[in-house]
C-alpha cells in the first residue's frame, strides 16, 4: 500500500519539484507522478510542469541524452532496451532517436564484447546451445541480434 502524503499547496510543490529537477535530470512523467503522489490537485499539474519547462528545469532532449549515456556507460544496456525505457517514460520519438544516435559506437561495442567475454568463461562459446544462452542474455540487455552474432563470431575466431 502506498501512503499518500497530505496535500501540499501549489507553491510548495513548485519549489520542491524545482529542487528535485535541479539536482538530477528528470522527465515530465516522473515529475507528474511526484505531483500526484504529493496530493496536489490535478488542476495545478500543468502550471507547474509549464514553469519547469520554461525555466529549463525539465528538458526532454537533455533528459534522453543523459538517460541514454548513463544506461550505456553504467548499466551496459543496449539500444533496444534504452529505446523501450524511454518510451515508457513518454519521451517523444525524435528525442529518443537523437539520444540513440549519440551513443559512442566504440564504447557500445566494447561493452558488448566485454559482457560476451565474461559469459564465455561460464559457457562454452563453441557449443551451439550455450552460445544461444549467451545470445539470449545479450538480447535481454537490449543489444541487436546482428551485433551479438558478429561479436560472438569475432571472439570465436580469435581463439
Image (cartoon, helix red, strand yellow):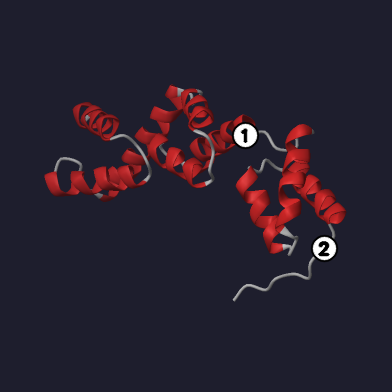
Q: Given the current orientation, which residue lies at the most extreme left position?
A: 128
- Using residue 83 as the reference point, say whether residue 64 is left or right of it: right
Residue marked by disc 1: 60
How far apart, in angstroms, are the residues tagged by discs 2 and 1? Answer: 26 Å
Residue marked by disc 2: 8
- Quadrant that contains the C terminus: top left
Who's the residue at 70% across and 57% down the image? 42
- Residue 134 on image: x %, y %: 26, 45
Mark 1 burial class by Cα count in 10 Å: few <14, some 14-19, many 20+: many
Q: Secondary structure at mark 2?
A: loop
- Residue 127 on image: x %, y %: 13, 45
Of labels 2 and 1, earlier in sequence is 2
Mark 2 burial class by Cα count in 10 Å: few <14, some 14-19, many 20+: few
- Quadrant that contains the N terminus: bottom right
Front residue (pair 22, 57):
57
Residue 141 numbered mark, or none: none
- Using residue 152 as the reference point, say whether residue 78 is left or right of it: right
- Using residue 44 as the reference point, say whether residue 124 is left or right of it: left
Who's the residue at 86% across and 55% down the image? 12
Amino acid at each position: 500500500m502506498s501512503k499518500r502524503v497530505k496535500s501540499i499547496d501549489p507553491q510548495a510543490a513548485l519549489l520542491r519539484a524545482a529542487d528535485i529537477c535541479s539536482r538530477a535530470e528528470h522527465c515530465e512523467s516522473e515529475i507528474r507522478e511526484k505531483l500526484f503522489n504529493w496530493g496536489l490537485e490535478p488542476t495545478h499539474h500543468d502550471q507547474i510542469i509549464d514553469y519547469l519547462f520554461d525555466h529549463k528545469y525539465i528538458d526532454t532532449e537533455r533528459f534522453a541524452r543523459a538517460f541514454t549515456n548513463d544506461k550505456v556507460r553504467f548499466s551496459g544496456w543496449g539500444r533496444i532496451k534504452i529505446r523501450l525505457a524511454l518510451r515508457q517514460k513518454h519521451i517523444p520519438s525524435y528525442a529518443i532517436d537523437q539520444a540513440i544516435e549519440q551513443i559512442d559506437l566504440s564504447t557500445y561495442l566494447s561493452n558488448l564484447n566485454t559482457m560476451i567475454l565474461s559469459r564465455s568463461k561460464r559457457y562454452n562459446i563453441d557449443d551451439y546451445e550455450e552460445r544461444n544462452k549467451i545470445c539470449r542474455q545479450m538480447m535481454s540487455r537490449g543489444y541487436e541480434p546482428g551485433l551479438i552474432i558478429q561479436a560472438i563470431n569475432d571472439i570465436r575466431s580469435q581463439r
